Image (spheres, rainbow, N blue to C red):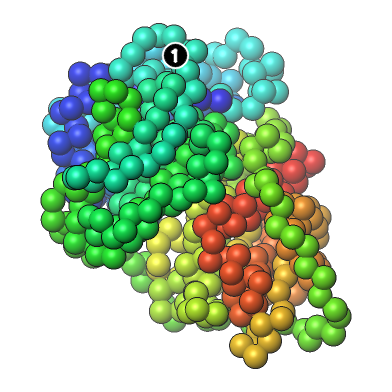
Amino acid sequence: MKFHWLLPSFLGVFLLTGAAQAARLQSWRFDASQNRLYITTDGGVQPKAQLIFNPTRLVIDLPGTSLGRQSLNQPFSGAIESVRLGQFDDDTTRIVVELKDGFTIDPAQIKFRGISPSEWTVDLPTPTRAENSNSSSELGGERLSVDPSATASNTAETTVVQNVQVTADGFLVRTVGGRPQINFQQSRAGDIATLDIEGATLAPGLNSQQPQTNGKHGVERIEVRQLPTDPPITRVTLRMNSSNTQWRASVTSLGSIAVLPAGTRTPTTPRRLTVDPPVRSYPSMQPPVDRTRNPQPLPRTITGSTDLPPVSNRRSVVVLDPGHGGRDPGAVGIGGIQEKDIVLDISFQVARILEQQGVQAVMSRTDDSEIDLEPRVSLAERLNATLFVSIHANAINMSRPDVSGIETYYFDNGLDLARTIHTSILQGTGADDRRVRQARFYVLRKTTMPSVLLEVGFVTGAEDAAKLSDPAYRSQMAASIARGILLYLQQR
C-alpha cells in the first residue's frame, strides 16, 4: 500500500506559509446534492488525503488542527453513506467520507480547492458501482492518490534516511532515493516535535547510532527509528528543553528535509473533556508472585508489518481505551514514569497500524483528558464497536522491583480475544508471562462486544520500567497488540 497526496501542486507554497500555528476546525458542511465538502478552520492548514478501498472511503487529515468537540457521525442517504469527524491524534483532525458497500469513486476526479489558507472545498465525483468488489475485497485496503510534485507514475523510488545533521540554523535529515513525503507535527505543549517520513526506511546502522545534538537550538536529543508499519515510516523525534520555539519542516530542492525554527511559539490551552463524576481508578488485582523469574531477552527485530494478517471484508470498528488521564495519572513507577503517558503513546501507534490495515480505530481519549469509566463504555456501545481494547500499565509496591510481566484480563465473551492478543505480545516483545485472567473490571462487564484489558508491564518493575521508558519498545508493544487484534478479526 502507498501514501500519496491528493492536493494540487500549485497550492503547496501557498499553504505552508499558514500552517505553523495550531488551528481549530471552525465549521464543516457536506452538500449531498453537489457531493461537495466545505471545511473552515481558524488558521491555515494543509490537508492531506487518501482514498482507501475495502470499504471505500475518503480520509482527509488536517494536521495541526484540533476538533474542539466530541467526535460525530452524520449519516446521509444515497451512495455517500456518512461523514465522520474525530480527533485522530493530539494534533490531527480526521474527516472520513464513507461510501456504501458496492460503490466507489474515481480518485482522479476528486478536486481540492483552497479558497484561502483556512477555507477549503472538496468536490467528489458521482459514485459508481464497483465492478470487481469481490476480488478487490480479498486484497484488503488499497491507498491511492496523486503526488503534488509529480507525474502519474506509481513506481516511486523508495526513500532511504541516511543521517541527521546539526546545521547552523537547525537540522538536516539527509535522504536518498525517492522524494520524501513528510508529516510534521509539534505537540500542544511544544516540547516534542515529530517528523514522519512516509514510505521511508533507515540506512543500515542508523537505528543504533542516534544523532547527538549537544543542546544545539534548544533540542535536548533527537531520536530516529523505524516504525513497524506498512508502508514503512521513519520517525524523527525532537525533544526540546524549551517549549518556546515553533518548528517547521520542508523538503529541500535536493530531496533532504530541513527542520528549522519558525519563530516564537504561542502557547495554546490544552483540550479537556469535562466528565462528572470524577475519575474512578481501576481496582488493583496483582496477586503475589512466588515463582522464580526467568525473563526472556528482548528480540533483536521489532514485529513488523510483514507479520500483520489481512482482515476480512467485514467492516470492523475497534475502540482503543488508553487508561486514566488528566488528574488521574494511573500508576506512577520508577523514575516517575506515569501510566497515562505510556498507554496513550502505545494506543496512538496501535490505532495507526489498524487504520493502515483497513480497520477503523477510535480512541476514547486522544490527549491528557479526564474521562470516567462510563463514557468509555458508552463510546463503544454507540459505535456498535466490533472490539473494545483497554490499555493499561501495572504496578505493585515499589519495594518489589523484581515483579515484571504481561497480564491480560477478560470478563465474559473476551476470552479468545484475550488469548490471541496476549500470545502476540509475548511473541513480539519477549515479556514475562503473567497469564490471561478473568476479572470484573467495569469496562469489561459493561461492554457487550468482546473486550479485554491489557496490562503492558509493571512501571514499578525494574525490567518493565526500563522497557516502557524506551520509545522503540513501546512501538514494539503497539505492533504486537495490533497484530493480535488483526489475528482475532481474521479468525472471526
In the visual, does 100 lie left or right of 236?
right
Quarter of the image with the N terminus is top right
Amino acid on which disc 1 is placed: Asp
Residue 422 in the image: x percent, y percent? 76, 58
Residue 158 in the image: x percent, y percent? 49, 23
Nearest the viewer among 128 and 322 is 322
Give the residue drawn at x 69%, y 49%.
300
Give the residue drawn at x 44%, y 9%.
153
Residue 450 in the image: x percent, y percent? 72, 56
Question: Does 137 appear above or below 109?
Answer: below
Residue 17, picture quadrant: top left
In the visual, does 341 lie left or right of 296?
left
Question: Does 288 appear above or below 357?
Answer: below
Nearest the viewer among 432 and 252 is 252
Question: Does 154 appear above or below 279?
Answer: above
Which element is circle 1 on? loop
Give the residue number, with chain letter if any, for mark 1: 106
Give the residue drawn at x 65%, y 47%.
302
Quarter of the image with the C terminus is top right
Residue 34 in the image: x percent, y percent? 30, 21
Residue 407, picture quadrant: bottom right
Can residue 23 be seen here?
A: no
Nearest the viewer among 307 and 123 is 307
User: How many numbered badges does the structure rendering display?
Assistant: 1
Can residue 456 be seen here?
A: yes
Nearest the viewer among 100 and 106 is 106
Q: Circle 1: is it few (<14), some (14-19), or many (20+) Cα within 10 Å?
A: few
